[in-house]
Amino acid sequence: MMPSTAEPFGPPPFRFTPRPNPLTVWAFSLPFRVLATLLNVGCIAWMGRLWQGGAFAPPAGSSAVAALGWPLAALSLMLYTWWHIVTSRTTLSAEALHQTWVWDKHMELRELAYGKLIRIHGLDWLIAPRFYVRTLLGKFAVFYAADQRMLDEFTRLRDELKAFRQS
């Protein structure tokens, strides 16, 4: 059998090494996490006051479950999202970008074709900047980061990726 000298199909894989490797940061800023917490506490207190005032009393002929079903479902979704906001972390390694979230996001660096840093300057302390990435096959993801070290690495990654794909 003769050894194959054929080149692999497609462009070469992109390589990037963050400093430090890996770098893990909070996905959302502390003020945003505090705001999300206060909103949830406020909604819980408001629902408690409504409960005490009889607003959730079941109408004649129905059960308490019917009266509480939708409000408790809404509160449950809010608390579920809140939990993911306050615990979400973004990691950049030499192999991939990863963010814990309601559904974890993962993107291999070697497959990246495009990256764009989206931010509102002056409001980074509240609204977490995000890094939009797309693969060669068109798959995309958005990764949040509320730490200047990660934003610096996202900028460096974006610039190196653009230079690599243009060469």
Image (spheres, helix red, strand yellow):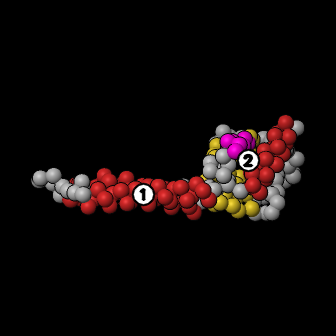
Residue 3: percent from the left, percent from the top?
A: 87, 52
Of mark 2 and mark 1, the one earlier in the sequence is: 1
Q: Quadrant of residue 63?
A: bottom left
Q: Is residue 18 above or below residue 130?
A: below
Q: Amino acid at mark 1?
A: Gly
Q: Amino acid at mark 2?
A: Glu
Report the span colored magenta: 115-122
Left or right: 26 as drawn, with respect to 39 = right
- For image coordinates 75% across by 55% down, the residue present is 148
Q: Is residue 129 visible?
A: no
Q: Secondary structure at mark 1?
A: helix
Residue 121 lies in magenta, yes or no? yes
- For image coordinates 82% across by 60% down, the residue present is 19
Residue 161: percent from the left, percent from the top?
A: 81, 44
Residue 47 lies in magenta, yes or no? no
Q: Dot 2, crowdedness within 10 Å: few (<14), some or many (≥20)?
A: many
Q: Which residue is mark 2?
A: 111
Q: Which residue is mark 1?
A: 42
